[in-house]
Image (cartoon, rainbow, N blue to C red):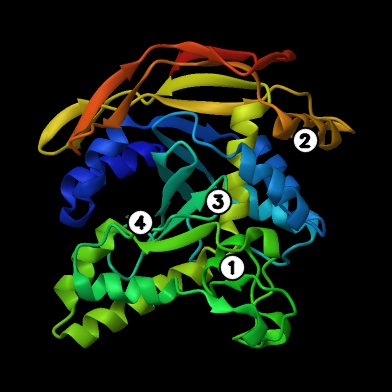
Amino acid sequence: MADLLNEFWRESENEAHLKCYTNLIRQARPYTLDDDAVDLITEISSGKTIADKLAIYRKLARLPFETIWIEFNYAARHVARVRLGTIVGNMPEDSPIKMGWLLRRIDETTWRATTVAHFTSSKSGREVDTFGCDQILSTEGIINYKSTARDPTIKSAINELNAHRSAKLMGRNDNIDVGPFQSYMWGFGSRNQEPNVISIPPHLARINAIDLAPSFETIIKKISKTEKEKFDNTHKQMERSCRELQGDLRFLCAALALINEVPLTYNNYQQSGVARVGGRLRPYMINRLVSISIPKKRGRVNKIMNMLRTAERAIRRHEVSGHWRNIKQPDGKIKKVWIREHMRGDASLGFVKQERLVEHK
């Protein structure tokens, strides 16, 4: 079985509703987290103090490139959760084999993530597919949310799910407005099982939004016979995804913070052979396995958290590889510009060392 990146690439060429991702997949900078990295990220994104840590991760979670891909083995995260005591029991039979995110930059401080999973089987018959709900995050300030949906009825349903409601009407004493489904992405649900009382921390309110995944707009329009069905199906797909992806945003922000600020080792690998993509035989795309360079021993988590707290105040010096960026021109047109490799950050705080090895399998 190929890695999820290549499986998703192949499916995007063959499945009509996934064709909207084909170019993004080819442009994405890949990161495949090894099991140790997954265990570490799960640990630092869990626990009683997570609400305070998320304020750190959020600031450090800017995308290092215009488009990136992150994937991991789902079983590794389940094992980590069992070890930490956040869940009990064996992994459910309908759990994915692998899970990943296709992330693209909206602007310097805002990004959008599409969740992708590989299942052994599914009701739709497709083993690799996206979830119905995209996540949008602002790493600084209140989010400036805008749906990418084209259909007016679908867009109306999305806007309703993102509507913020007065906290005072929900039994709270602060003036923070919260969105009921944005809280699920952080892993914060209703308080005391009351559906209209949200327990999301105030500093996380109004910084993220949800949108319908572009692939699902095609599906919803196909299965809906009336405008009401279209509206209801949009709600159903997004609400279901929000609950299934509960807590994923904290894991994703912690993963990006580590990628940006902690010494890592990258091993490039490419599966041997070819895949039939779009009717042609093509070599598999190169992926990269990410490992934490800091030895796994007592005190490692505290050491890494100290790095992240320091980086929150100022960004350490690090290399930014050359990449393409879409620049909006004064006339509204988008121009693709090549950004040369360069150094960014404060050298007085140290350097982030990145090692890259090429390995063929």
Residue that badge 4 annotates: 130
For disc 2, the neighbor class at 10 Å (few under 14, some 14 to 19, many from 20) is some
Residue that badge 3 annotates: 74
Which is in the foreground here, disc 4 or disc 1?
1
Is 103 left, or right, of 279 in this rendering?
right
Is 51 left, or right, of 122 in this rendering?
right
Q: Mark 2 and mark 4: span between their CA atoms?
A: 33 Å
In terms of secondary structure, where does tag 4 sit?
Answer: strand
Residue 344 horizontal/vertical position (percent): 56, 17
Q: Is residue 222 above or below residue 307?
A: below
Q: Is residue 249 above or below residue 280?
A: below
Residue that badge 1 annotates: 183
Q: Mark 2 and mark 3: span between their CA atoms?
A: 28 Å
Q: Mark 4 and mark 1: span between their CA atoms?
A: 21 Å
Q: Quadrant of the N terminus?
A: top left
For disc 3, the neighbor class at 10 Å (few under 14, some 14 to 19, many from 20) is some
Is any atom of residue 262 visible in this view? yes
| Amino acid type, label 1 | Ser
Residue 104 horizontal/vertical position (percent): 38, 41
In terms of secondary structure, where does tag 2 sit?
Answer: helix
Q: Mark 4 and mark 3: span between their CA atoms?
A: 15 Å
Q: Mark 1 and mark 3: span between their CA atoms?
A: 22 Å
- Residue 8: quadrant of the picture: top left
- Comparing 329 with 336, the one in front is 329
In terms of secondary structure, where does tag 1 sit?
Answer: helix
Q: Are marks 1 and 3 in contact (CB under 8 Å)?
A: no
Q: Are marks 2 and 1 in contact (CB under 8 Å)?
A: no
At horizontal 44% and vertical 22% (from top left) the residue drawn is 269
Q: Are marks 2 and 3 in contact (CB under 8 Å)?
A: no
Q: Earlier in the sequence, mark 4 or mark 1?
A: 4
For disc 1, the neighbor class at 10 Å (few under 14, some 14 to 19, many from 20) is many
